[in-house]
Structure formats: C-alpha cells, structure tokens
Amino acid sequence: MARSRKQRAVSNTAAPTSSPSYIEKKKTLSIKETESQQSWSRTKAIFKYKLVPPIFVLIFTPAVQFLACQANNPASSFEFERTLGNAFSWKVVTIFFCWALLFLYIPSRTFNGPPTEFGYVPVYVDNGMLYYIASFITYLVLHVIYPDLSLDIYNNMPYILGSLNLFALILCIILQYMGINRPQTSEKLERSSLMYEFYRGMEIHPRLLGVDVKQWTNCRVGMMSWQILIIAFLIAGSREGSINPGHAANVFIQTIYIAKFFWWETGYFNTLDIILDRAGYYICWGCLVWVPCFYTYSSFYLVEHQSTFTSLGAIIIVLIGLIAITTNYRIDYEKQIFRDTKGDCKIWGEPAKYIKAVNQITKQPSNLSLSGFWGKGRHLNYTFELMAAFAWCFPGYGHGFWPFLYFIFLLGLLVHRCYRDEEKCSKKYGRFWDEYCKKVPYRMIPYLY
Ligand SMILES: NC(=O)C1=CN([C@@H]2O[C@H](COP(=O)(O)OP(=O)(O)OC[C@H]3O[C@@H](n4cnc5c(N)ncnc54)[C@H](OP(=O)(O)O)[C@@H]3O)[C@@H](O)[C@H]2O)C=CC1
Ligand SMILES: CC(C)CCC[C@@H](C)[C@H]1CC[C@H]2C3=CC=C4C[C@@H](O)CC[C@]4(C)[C@H]3CC[C@]12C
C-alpha cells in the first residue's frame, strides 16, 4: 500500500513534464511568447524608424524658436522672419563657427579615438582646454570694445537660433549626401528610408574641411556656445551692474561642469555619441541648435524672471552642484583609469576587482570593473549628472516648471541612454555582461533602480 502511494507520488510529479498535453501546452506557450516578442520588436521598429525621425525633426526644430520667444517676451508671438536670422545673428554665428574651426587647425597634439569595427581610427585634435580658456577670455575682452555684446546676444536669441537652425539643417543634408554618394570609410551600411537616414546620419566619423565633424559640432560649437551664452545671459540679466546671486549660482555650476568637459574632452571620444552615433540630425543638429537653446535655457529664463535666492541659498546650491559634478567626474575617471591600466590599478585604496571579460566582436580581452562606483551601480555617473543639473536649475524655483525643463529632458535622455548603453554592452560582452548585471544589479539608484 505504502509503496503504491509512493509510486503515485512519483508519477504525479513526473506526469506533467512528459505527458503529451504538457508538451503541447509548453509548445503553445513558447509560440505565444515568440509571437509576442516578434510583435513587440515590430512595434519598436515602427516607432524607431517611422515615427521618431519625423516627430523629432518636425517638433524639435520649431520648438527652439518658440522657446526663445517664450522666455524673452511671453507676450511676443512666433514670427516667421526670425527663423531666417538677421545680419547680427549671421555675423555672430559665422565668427563663432570659424573660431571653433581655427582651433582644430592649430598644430596640436592629436588623440586617436577607439577603432571602429571596420578598422577606421578617428584622429582628434587634443587642445580642448586651450580652446576653452582662449574662447572664454576673448569673449570677456570683447566687452571692452563692444559693451552691449551680451545684451544684444540675449535680445537677438530668436534670430541666432534661426541662423543656427538653418545652418544645421543644411549641414545635415550635406552629411547625408556625402554619406550616400561619397562615403569616406570602407563601412558597408544598409540603406533605410531617407527620413531615417537624415535623422540618424550616415557616417560615424565624417570629415569636412579637414576636421572631424563631430568634434567640431559636439565638443567645440555645442559645448562652447553653452558656456558663452550662459555668461551672456548672466551679464544681460544684471541690473545696474549688480548680479543676482541665484543667477550667478546657476551660471557658476554650469561653468564648472563645462570646464570639466573640456578638461576631459578626450574621454568623451570613447562615449556612445562618438563611437555609436552617426553624424546626422540627432547629434549634429542636437549639438548645433538644441544645446545652445535648451541646455542654456535655465540661464536664459532667469534674465526676465529673477531668482529669489539669497546669497546663502546660492552658496548652498553651489556646494551641492560642486559635489555632484565632482562625483560624476570621479565615476568617469575611475572607469578611465581602469580602462587605461586594464584593471591593474587601485580603486578606493584597494586593487581593482573585475570580471575577466572578452569583447565578443573583436575577441579581445576587455574587463568589467567591480570596484568603486562601478561596483555599486551600473550608471551612477548619470545619477550625479542629474543631481548637478537639478542644482543649477533650482535657482529658478518659484517660476513654475520652465527653469526645470533641462532637468526633465535630461531625466528622459539618461534613462533612455542607460538602456541604449546596456544594449551595446550586452552585444559587446555577451554572457560576461549578464554576469556583471547579476553582481551589480542596480542601474542608477542602489536598491531601487
Ligand atoms: N548632459 C548630457 O546631456 C549628458 C551627459 N552625459 C555624461 O557624459 C559622461 C559619459 O557618459 P556615457 O557616454 O553615456 O557613458 P558612460 O561613461 O556611462 O560609459 C558607459 C560605457 O562604460 C563601459 N562600462 C560599463 N560598465 C563598465 C564597467 N563595470 N567597467 C568598465 N567599463 C564599463 C562600457 O563601454 P566599453 O566597455 O566599451 O568601454 C559602457 O558602454 C557621463 O558623465 C554622463 O553623465 C551623458 C549623456 C548626456
Ligand atoms: C534631437 C535632440 C532633441 C536630442 C539631441 C541630443 C544631443 C544634443 C545630446 C545627446 C547626448 C548629449 C551629450 C552627451 C554627453 C555629454 C558629455 C558631458 O560631459 C557634456 C555634455 C555632452 C557632450 C552631451 C551634449 C548633448 C548631447 C550630445
């Protein structure tokens, strides 16, 4: 009796896995699973290739013109004539573009970026800090000759954005034409719709007039225009020579952030924007127009809408901002040291711990750090980036959500970028990446996300 009960128990547990109905059920389930996976990938593809490009181009391009009118003079309506620029805006934009170009021609040390899968090694000019300091000083000195320069820049912002918009759109068309008809590298790129190609870009490292296009757009024009414009807005916003403490804190934190970028410019050549993104609307228009308009927006807004921060409030927010920027830099630095020494270094006072990983594409070893910040979260640098952005937007507190626009945008950008980066790493490292994700399970906030 006891034996037969045991047998039943065994057969009860064994039956489901071997019975035909169980196998059928499993098959139907896995078919359903793959069907839903396929339909999800189809939806994602429609979104990525068909919807995002026209929506971005048609919404973001005019949005910059609207933003520039909105804060400058909320009563002023959109005027088409501004989208064409004016004599002042074209003069300013042309001089600035040529100045940025000049520094890429000055004989300097060069820096070789990471080679592409098709064996192209991009060469960059390594004089970011010289360009930054020279541009900053020159801008301040120009006020001696032209005391109203900052005020004129502020008042002509809708026209300046009009000139930038036109120039950037034409550049993207040229880049697309060159990529289709005269590609500069041996990369074999599958063709897609013209709209998608315009948005995404064609080539990863195109060169024009002898310079690397993305170094010129992203690092030199985008980042330096951000710096010059916020200084111009601070000067334009000063009333009878006195500077508002909240506005000063907002500009000071961003200035440290931008100076840090130029200090670390060669580190930027290893990031997604440079190694993965192609030179098209997203990156080139983004850096030529979106950065000068949107990244500077909190400072632009504070000209008309004075910050209510006291000097003490300003000092506290500057300290918070500096802590965030330093930590963000520290995290990027820990990765750079780890990569440069291939893991043979000390992090947080101890020899670095890592996963011995292999790049699945090149089959070369490329370890994944488990030490310091990279052992606590997979993208803590983004968390501190957001904290810094929040700090410089905060002096606009009390004026609704407009001064926080950049922070809100950055939140979306960085969460999305986390997934883009992880997709890249999963392809690059395969099972080693899964192992890393198991050991470091959180992305941006330990124990939460
Ligand atoms: N203000 C803004 O608009 C934005 C600012 N940023 C800032 O730019 C900086 C760079 O960011 P981003 O380019 O996104 O990339 P990250 O600096 O976050 O680098 C991600 C890459 O690091 C490598 N990596 C990941 N995990 C490890 C590990 N455990 N050990 C060693 N290497 C690892 C991988 O590249 P690999 O293995 O190939 O080396 C991965 O692709 C950050 O400070 C960020 O905050 C970024 C986006 C937008
Ligand atoms: C089409 C647009 C709505 C979106 C354009 C986005 C781009 C302008 C930005 C995408 C990623 C951004 C950056 C990445 C990393 C950076 C390093 C940091 O230290 C300074 C800022 C930046 C260069 C930043 C600049 C804007 C982007 C390229």
Image (cartoon, helix red, strand yellow):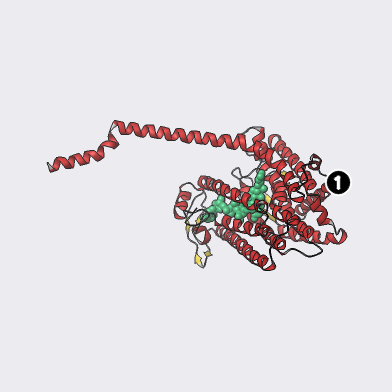
Quadrant (top left/top right/bottom left/bottom right) for the N terminus: top left
Taking the image as shown, residue 70 lies to the left or right of residue 144, namely left
In the depicted view, which residue is nearer to us: 71 or 165?
A: 71
Taking the image as shown, residue 243 lies to the left or right of residue 279, namely right
Q: Relative to residue 346, is residue 163 depicted above or below?
A: above
Residue 213 shows in the view: yes
Residue 188 shows in the view: no
**Residue 74 horizontal/vertical position (percent):** 75, 48
In the depicted view, which residue is nearer to us: 105 or 218?
A: 218
Residue at left offset 70%, top offset 52%: 297
Residue ID for mark 1: 87
**Residue 58 horizontal/vertical position (percent):** 69, 38
Residue at left offset 52%, top offset 54%: 378
In the depicted view, which residue is nearer to us: 441 or 123?
A: 441
**Residue 417 horizontal/vertical position (percent):** 58, 48
Residue at left offset 68%, top offset 42%: 60
Q: Residues within 10 Å of mark 1 (few under 14, many from 20)?
A: few
SS of the residue under disc 1? helix
**Residue 432 horizontal/vertical position (percent):** 47, 50
Q: Relative to residue 328, is residue 429 depicted above or below?
A: above
**Residue that protrudes farthest toward the right in the picture:** 145
The picture quadrant where one finds residue 65 is: top right
Taking the image as shown, residue 149 lies to the left or right of residue 416, namely right
Amino acid identity at mark 1: Ala
The number of callouts visible is 1
Instruction: Determine whether the beta carbon of the residue marked 1 sits less than 8 angstroms from the nearest atom of ligand 2.
Output: no
In the depicted view, which residue is nearer to us: 403 or 443?
A: 403
